[in-house]
Image (cartoon, rainbow, N blue to C red):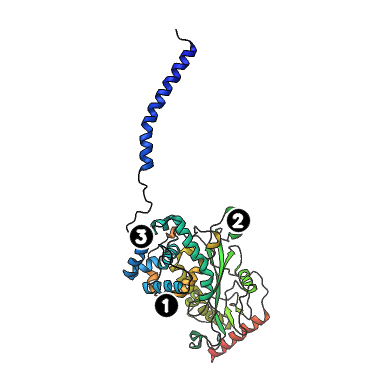
Amino acid sequence: MESWEDEVRRFMLEEEEEDDELFLVMVPALQQCLYEEKRSEHTSTLPGAEKVIQILEGHENWCKVEFRMEPEIFRVIANYLRVENLLRDTRGVRVEEQLRMFMFMLSHNASTDRLKKEFQHSGETIHRKITEFFDIIPALTHRFLKLPNVSHTHVKIASDSRFMPFFQNCIGAIDGTHVPITIAQERAAPYRNRKGTLSQNVMCVCDFDLNFTFISCGWEGSASDAGVLRSARAKGFHVPVGKFYLVDGGYANTSSFIAPYRGVRYHLSEFRRHGNQYANYKELFNHQHAQLRNHIERAFGVLKKRFPILKVGTFHPIENQIKIPAAAAVFHNLIRKLNGDEGWLDHQPNNINPSDYVELPEGDNNYPNELQSNEGSTLRDQIALQMWAARNN
């Protein structure tokens, strides 16, 4: 009869034999894994650079869907970025492909993983190129969002008896728009707007050609339109002496920012329902004011149709999310400057699912401070009474 020491020794010997057998089975399998050829993550037969060429040389509708512009406009912008040394060709990624990356991201709200699949580049390359493009947005904003020429009255005013001479010193319209934002929970509170969603309040200025002439991004969604304008003025946004912009009821009425009369019908639909009849000079003024200020509503409409990323939360760091509205405004102006078509936007399939759109406020209805400028009230009354007298005559 074996002792307990002999029994333990026999058990350990059996365990060693089983381990040896297991080792003999596992080693060949491990060796096969180690020496097996590594599978490539990028398996597309059409790399990003070649796909850019295919799209540019194909039907222009494909280019409009992917790049939000016509092929010839895409080529002009890419060449400009290269000539101005804003972007450079690098090994494997030419400027055209960098522009396509950014426009695809802007048009589809594409994540890094989707961009990797679309362009067949590593995540590191995608991240670097998108970041480099975001880095040049301030320079592009400075170049292509310029305050209007104030030496003459805009032709849309000068050629229309409804507006001339009453608005001859008007140089554009101002309004705020909310753009969704994604931010860490501990920093989210100031960005929560009155709809309960998270957004940045973006102030935009446009001229009567529907071009954006100024933009201020990054203000928290809880900020008022008037507060954003005050901040912009403190940082250098100015109105030339004797000129003014049209604003809605969310701003104070001053000699530089003319608002409509409160408590008086204002929206164009209200006037249409009443056959454009006016009870007094204030209603007449509000109607003509609304018709001119409607230019910024139309500009916003085109901008958000072309770039629906402005309606959804995005995947980018907060410092780049703030630049997205400015980037959209820059390309909006460039496309218009190069005579790009906009009619097709009304029939454009959604690159971004509308179910992902964030519910946002549409603007401030009333200025939070009832104090108004005496100079602004006097100027508005002068314009309205002149308009009323001309109509009666």
The quadrant holding residue 258 is bottom right
**Are circles 3 and 1 on residues that touch, CB within 8 Å?**
no
Q: Which residue is mark 3?
A: 47
- Seen in the picture, residue 46 relative to 339 is either above or below; the reply is above
Q: Quadrant of the C terminus?
A: bottom right
The quadrant holding residue 376 is bottom right
Between tags 1 and 2, which lies in front? Answer: 1
Marks 1/2: CA–CA distance: 40 Å
Residue type, label 3: Pro
Between tags 3 and 1, which lies in front? Answer: 3
Q: Earlier in the sequence, mark 3 or mark 1?
A: 3
Element on which disc 1 rests: loop
Alpha-carbon neighbours of circle 1 within 10 Å: few (<14), some, or many (≥20)? some
- Seen in the picture, residue 1 relative to 255 is either above or below; the reply is above
Residue 375 on image: x %, y %? 66, 82
- Seen in the picture, residue 108 relative to 392 is either above or below; the reply is above
- Identify the disc placed on residue 116: none
Residue 44 on image: x %, y %? 34, 56
- Identify the disc placed on residue 187: 2
Alpha-carbon neighbours of circle 3 within 10 Å: few (<14), some, or many (≥20)? some
Q: Quadrant of the N terminus?
A: top left
Element on which disc 2 rests: helix
**Are circles 1 and 2 on residues that touch, CB within 8 Å?**
no
Residue 245 on image: x %, y %? 57, 79
- Seen in the picture, residue 153 relative to 347 is either above or below; the reply is below
Residue 300 or 116: which is nearer the viewer? 116
Q: Earlier in the sequence, mark 2 or mark 3?
A: 3
- Identify the disc placed on residue 338: 1
Residue 38 or 142: which is nearer the viewer? 38
Residue type, label 1: Leu
